[in-house]
Amino acid sequence: NAGVMQNPRHLVRRRGQEARLRCSPMKGHSHVYWYRQLPEEGLKFMVYLQKENIIDESGMPKERFSAEFPKEGPSILRIQQVVRGDSAAYFCASSPLPHTPAGANVLTFGAGSRLTVL
Amino acid sequence: DAKTTQPPSMDCAEGRAANLPCNHSTISGNEYVYWYRQIHSQGPQYIIHGLKNNETNEMASLIITEDRKSSTLILPHATLRDTAVYYCIVRVASGANSKLTFGKGITLSVRP
């Protein structure tokens, strides 16, 4: 059972370009969470999605950032017109259906995608 | 989510037990205590969780006080590979508010 798969693992972009980060959740998981970790800082929640729905985007920057989790395919975190401050590790996590035994809604994280903006 | 308080760092000798404390005095009745860790540059890793009772798995034990206002994560025989930042998080199990909110955690250094 493969874990949470993120790609690319490393991405280099120049200022003004677009970055697309992909996340394939674990098999059977229908919830996806994105986190950002700036260099030498903690993990910050960005967005929580279910299939085709955004549940909580309270941590998403208001501009340039968007996320989707289509019915088919991976979840995508898209950053338009990247700036140097977007350089960070972006982690995706997935969790199972909501009706699992109470408390068992454990998030499983991927290895992350490291974005470097030149 | 309830706020948690952890010391910034601690160390222990390899092979000894590491006891990592966490205070969560404002925890609600439907909130669970979760522990995750992040080894340098890797994705966070789930360790254990609990509601009221003490829990044990192959990685660690979780001791929750009777009033649920604090807990301790125990790594029974710490190894060098257990050096990491450990996060104590309280959250509801599911629903729109089920995201994990990471604090600063406690940096555990295991020395040879």
Image: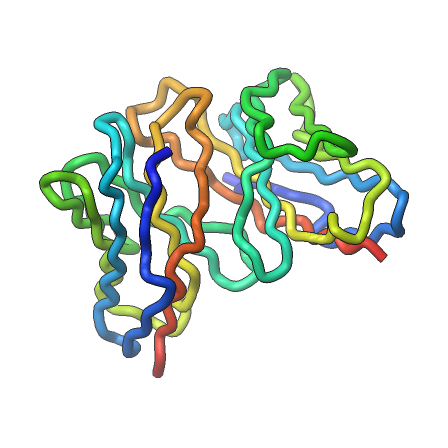
Where residue B28 appears, x then y in whole percent? Answer: 25, 29
Question: As rendered, which of A58 and A50 lies closer to the eye?
Answer: A58
Could you say which quadrant of the image residue B112 lies in? Answer: bottom left
Give the vertical position of A54 relative to B99 (above or below): above
Horizontal relation, residue A73 to residue A107: left or right: right
Quadrant of image for the C terminus of chain A: bottom right
Where residue A93 appears, x then y in whole percent? Answer: 53, 38
Horizontal relation, residue A70 to residue B99: left or right: right
Could you say which quadrant of the image residue B106 lies in? Answer: bottom left
Give the vertical position of A55 relative to A60 (above or below): above
Where residue B54 appears, x then y in whole percent? Answer: 15, 44
Q: Name the residue: 23% across, 59% down.
A: B74
Where residue A11 appears, x then y in whole percent? Answer: 78, 51
Question: As rendered, which of B13 and A62 lies closer to the eye?
Answer: A62
Residue lying farthest to the bottom in this orientation: B112
Q: Name the residue: 48% across, 61% down.
A: B39
Q: Name the residue: 61% across, 16% down.
A: A53
